[in-house]
Amino acid sequence: MIAGHGLMATGLALLALPPPPGLPAAGWLSFAAALSGVGLGMAAPAGNNASMHLAKQEIAAVAGLRGMFRQTGGIVAVSLTTAAVSLSSRPGLAQAVAFAVSAALLAATLPLIVAMPDHRGRW
């Protein structure tokens, strides 16, 4: 989970930056998006397993709540970003700020992930 969240935060931070000189924008965006995607692919299954392991007798409820919060978070994030970009006089800058804020929020979760106890099935 730590590596996945770290990669997602790094990818989002890179999306907030302009491409380096000489590198095509499409290549830069592809690299940053791939980095974020790999991070999500690493973090999501670990998060699912960790949450379902905590309450084995309530797996259905845990799975449902995780899905609900994931979808709600995505809807809120996309809606706020779209509103900020559409109302901005500089939409590119507004989008970069949205990516930077998302990266900062993800980076802020890293200490919480590190602090999670690792019971390995012993409750």
Image (tube, helix red, strand yellow):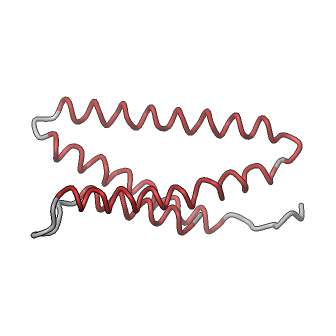
Left or right? Give the position of 77 relative to 13.
right
Identify the residue at horizontal 84%, vertical 40% (top origin): 58
Left or right? Give the position of 51 relative to 30.
right
Q: Which of the 4 image quadrants contains residue 69?
A: top right
Front residue of 35/98: it is: 35
Q: How many marks?
A: 0
Front residue of 10/105: it is: 10
Task: Report the quarter where the N terminus lies.
Answer: bottom right
The image position of residue 77, as x and y in percent, is: 40, 38
The image position of residue 94, as x and y in percent, is: 21, 43
Left or right? Give the position of 75 relative to 31.
right
Identify the residue at horizontal 64%, vertical 55% (top origin): 45
The image position of residue 74, as x and y in percent, is: 47, 37
Front residue of 76/32: it is: 32
Identify the residue at horizontal 76%, vertical 68% (top origin): 118
Q: Looking at the picture, does residue 36 appear above or below residue 62?
A: below
Identify the residue at horizontal 81%, vertical 66% (top origin): 119
Q: Looking at the picture, does residue 88 appear above or below residue 54?
A: above
Task: Report the quarter where the C terminus lies.
Answer: bottom right
Q: Looking at the picture, does residue 12 appear above or below residue 95?
A: below
The image position of residue 5, as x and y in percent, is: 50, 61
Q: Which of the 4 image quadrants contains residue 114?
A: bottom right
